[in-house]
Amino acid sequence: MKKVTINSVASHAGVSKKTVSRVLNNEPNVSAATREKVLKVFKELDYTPNPIARGLAQNRSFIIGCIYDNPSKSYITRVQTGALAACQENNYNLLIHPCELRGDALINNIDQLLQSSRLDGLVLTPPFSDFAELADFLKSKNIPYARVASAVLEDDSISVRSNDEQGAFEITEHLISLGHTAIAFIKGHPDHSATEQRFMGYRRALATHGIEFEERLVEEGNFSYHSGVDSARSILDLSPRPTAVFASNDYMAAAVLKLATQRSLKVPEDISIAGFDNAPIARHIWPGLTTIAQPVEEMTKQAVTQLIASIVEPQEKPYQATLEAKLITRESTAAVK
Amino acid sequence: MKKVTINSVASHAGVSKKTVSRVLNNEPNVSAATREKVLKVFKELDYTPNPIARGLAQNRSFIIGCIYDNPSKSYITRVQTGALAACQENNYNLLIHPCELRGDALINNIDQLLQSSRLDGLVLTPPFSDFAELADFLKSKNIPYARVASAVLEDDSISVRSNDEQGAFEITEHLISLGHTAIAFIKGHPDHSATEQRFMGYRRALATHGIEFEERLVEEGNFSYHSGVDSARSILDLSPRPTAVFASNDYMAAAVLKLATQRSLKVPEDISIAGFDNAPIARHIWPGLTTIAQPVEEMTKQAVTQLIASIVEPQEKPYQATLEAKLITRESTAAVK
DNA sequence: TTTATCCATGACACCGGTGTCATAATGGTG
DNA sequence: CACCATTATGACACCGGTGTCATGGATAAA
């Protein structure tokens, strides 16, 4: 079985390879009859253009890279799902590149990646979507990129986010509406802009309802389950103990739940727990976690779609959007006793 | 800033591009002096070969595809981690391709994928690693592939697995040693060969210890959390109720735990629960799940390493290995009352 | 010293597409 | 009908590497 190339198609159709190329790319200036003839040969020979050859000629790879460093694996999975959906629609492929570096080492690593793969563009996910120096580097190299879930708005690039501040506000308000006033808060990783956003939403809700903010109720986490365990320990040791805990993501909330249960506290009777993200674990545990559902897949899909569009033809104004987050109430929150 | 290509290197070094190519690929028949000179120019010009051009010339893409359809996202994450490790060591990239199809549609989909990406090889993960027709198709197309975690041994291809049967045997024996004799079992997805393996291990342990196998204690699951909920319902409704449940993976075990807790059963006092895989959720919930740790990352890393080796130069005998699974005891299992 | 062998190197085609430009055919206008 | 603009098409170079083969000089064997 011989390989079917543009040359074999051309000779079968009795036209030049350039004409075949024109049909392939829907270029104008091909007569209807010729186009018809070539399309017929495509079918007969079951021809698919070689993306590598095309890439060489156009200096493109048809590959998008996805950069991440996130302790929440389920978040990454959702990011991938969204990115893949956009890629598949546009005949692009997705290359995944986990990366734990920061500063110069990060820049060098990404540089290396770009050298070795000739990626057409990058999707930056938190925390990389918030790094100005990385954005500057990519700009200097002229590599298109899109940022997902970043609160940094100054950078004039494609960006799709959800409203973390508002989500945090709503879930805090939900707790307040249940009568809670002593609401502990676990922060996320300081590198992520969402961390500050969620904290601000929490504080705004307290302020709106005339509840005094207390520093002692705030713990530093980093989005990992493990950090949640440490924070939970501190919080459950407080006296008086808060009646509710709002953790900046579901993994840390799950850690609070585990520790509380270990200590024979009943959730939500003795203490209410709220998370953020609506990760699978939020519904895999008992009681299920009240949380904020973020459209991670949709955010990423939009970001990648726009990224590819901007590769095909540079946009005048980069797409920027903020999607809605939504409160999901489950069994882990209840009225204060 | 001009692009640095093999031509600019050649003219700077005063040699032909072919000689540069020789140096690049560590080919013999280059004098030490020439090699030195070319290497120096590499440094000066900061040259990196263009993988696309190289791919065109050698009809290679330097990309491995990873095919999966698994309800367990954490399993996929681990597979990716292992595959990425192997790829990075060999300057390959990883393309991820989730796929929910079966039969002819599956074959067509993979065919399409191969047409459009010219992948150098595929890693098949469960359940695809068990599909003979897919393996046959890839053989006919002459596409190298490696299988991860498949119990199918007939196929003469690269395969790295862990001993599911033995793992299931050990964890069942662990329950028996705690005094349990009425041990319910939740099966996995029938498409996965691991499903049958784990079931066999369970039965072998019962037989070894003279415990009669009871059909009524077996439920059909499919590895998803949701299916675990359904199976758990049936099991907890049994009367007399079994004193232990062994679920074929941790997600289903977590579902049993959730339902049992909802029904105010105490785990492990009222009922012991065991899982399989050592997924993150096994330690994120309370009580932590007794389970079998499989070296998923390592399996995949070995598989991909061998796959790449076989692409570089065809092997006489495909690598096949079986790695050890290990019992992890946590709080979800205890002696029968 | 002559001949055969080996080594280092380069010229050139090739991989499978796309971009540029020339050219022939077609159509519209004065 | 002559002239110019437009459309359809192809020839050919090019993208940046690798494979094949020829060549000339160095080395070994006769």
Image (tube, coloured by chain):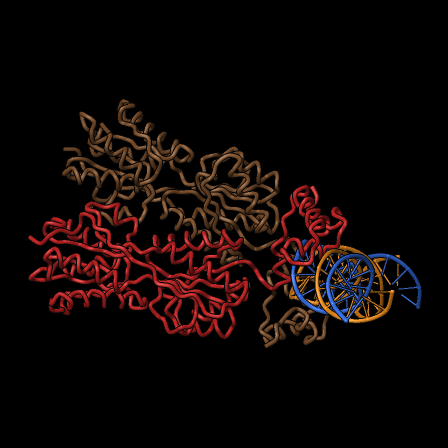
Chain colours: A red, B brown, C blue, D orange
Indicate the position of residue B111 as horizontal and vertical percent values: 57, 43
Q: Is residue B6 above or below residue A267?
A: below
In this view, the residue in front, B222 or A327, is A327
Indicate the position of residue A11 as horizontal and vertical percent values: 76, 49
Q: Is residue B22 above or below residue B97?
A: below
Residue at horizontal 17%, vertical 57%? A174
Indicate the position of residue B232 as horizontal and vertical percent values: 25, 34
For residue A221, what is the image quadrant? bottom left
**Quadrant in which the C terminus of chain B is drawn:** top left
In screen coordinates, is A107 left or right of C16?
left
- The answer to whether residue A124 shows anywhere in this view is yes
For residue A216, what is the image quadrant? bottom left
In screen coordinates, is A117 left or right of A256?
right
Q: How many marks?
A: 0
**Quadrant in which the N terminus of chain B is drawn:** bottom right
Residue at horizontal 40%, vertical 67%? A101
- The answer to whether residue A100 shows anywhere in this view is no
For residue A274, what is the image quadrant? bottom left
In this view, the residue in front, B320 or B239, is B239
Q: Is residue B256 above or below residue B47?
A: above
Indicate the position of residue A190 as horizontal and vertical percent values: 29, 68
